[in-house]
Image (cartoon, grey):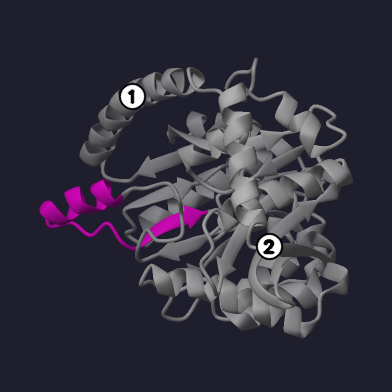
Amino acid sequence: MKQDAIQLRVINSLSQIAEDDWNALLSPEAGPFLKYAFLNALELSGCVGGNTGWQVAHLLVEDSESRLLGAMPLYLKRHSYGEFVFDWAWAQAYEQNNMPYYPKALSAIPFTPVRGPRLLVAQTANKNEVQEILVSGLKTLVNQNALSSAHVLFPESNELLELEKQGFMLRNSVQFHWQSIGYIDFEQFLADLTMKRRKNIRRERASVAMHKISYQHIPGTQATRDDWAFFYRCYENTYIEHRSSPYLTEECIQILGRDMPENFHLIIAIQDERPIASSLLVVDRPNSKAYGRYWGAIEHIPCLHFELAYYQAIEYCIQEGIQIFEGGAQGEHKMARGFLPTALQSAHWIADASFSNAVKRFLEREREGMAAYVDELEQHIPLKSSKVLL
């Protein structure tokens, strides 16, 4: 593949390319969040684009005949909401020096702190070459548009090598994931926990059971528009209670339920024959993973969140033979429910040299603090014998 035969192109809508062409770039490990259907639903429903602060700017690598060789999901951001890797302090430092931090370039899955490929390459293309072109093209886009920086959140480990080679600085973060070791039921999972954690979970489940709640598990392929509408009512209520606005719209949820139902699983809590709460799992069967995305309730019952979003989901994973359940970003409280700390990394490139050096020093100090934090977490591992996952 000759360099002069390659062209970079930015598109402001995924609809500008064919669904099959985009999905052909995805490896079997890519998971559901990078599917055309998922990203396109965010655009069609207005969750990104418009006045959301997420300007669509997907970066494409094409050959001289406009065949897609590679791509990067990309957005120009005018704020730092919905990212889960926090750079508000960097933005404040820019502002204090009368420099604009926004817009910035962000390669990530909106509102979704999940590790996955960010440098997508066609199977027939030279992977190293296309990845190099994508990263250098991202930096060029930043410079040509006078952006402050570029950020690649939760990429795959092998992509970090190319990013670091081209001057990106790595930043560590920790999430909490549940992992099966071949459990046959929930009781066997509990048996692996320390006595303190086992007793705590049983106490929480018993407190919910006193309210005579049953649970309905609905595969996405069987969910109706009414099911999705009820889930959205619960999801929206969570944000209202925290005096904020939901990232997703009901239209987006309905589109996702229609276009990729095989990747969703609803869990609904029912009391007195009336649904009162719901949680949503995204399921990646080829990679034996499930992701807890959202939950909500229209009535408050103590510990129902833990039952619906964690324990029912873990039971589902055990029943379906799913190996890993990611319960979402952050949340040390998850450790008390059998989740283990898991290290992830993101990559950051700052255009201004002086600020880049300042961020580099910040990240060096942060890494030391993160290492100490991980050491502290290991002292509270909920299992009888385990360690931080890599």
| Image location of residue 161, percent across then percent down | 57, 29
Q: Earlier in the sequence, mark 2 or mark 1?
A: 2
Indicate the position of residue 226 as horizontal and vertical percent values. Answer: 74, 84
Q: 330 left or right of 1?
A: left
The segment highlighted magenta reads 88-107
The residue lying at 84 percent from left, 37 percent from top is 185
Q: Amino acid at mark 2?
A: Leu
**Residue 327, label in figure:** none
257 to 26, vertically: above or below: below
Residue 53 on the magenta segment: no
Mark 2, secondary structure of its residue: strand
SS at mark 1 in the image? helix
- Of 176 and 359, the residue lying toward us: 176
Q: Residues within 10 Å of mark 2 (few under 14, many from 20)?
A: many
The quadrant of the picture occupied by the C terminus is top right
- Most foreground residue, 93 or 318: 318
Q: Which residue is mark 1?
A: 369
**Residue on which disc 2 sits:** 280
Q: Amino acid at mark 1?
A: Gly
The quadrant of the rendering that contains the N terminus is top right
Judge from the rendering whether residue 229 lies leftward or rightward of residue 378; answer left or right.
Answer: right
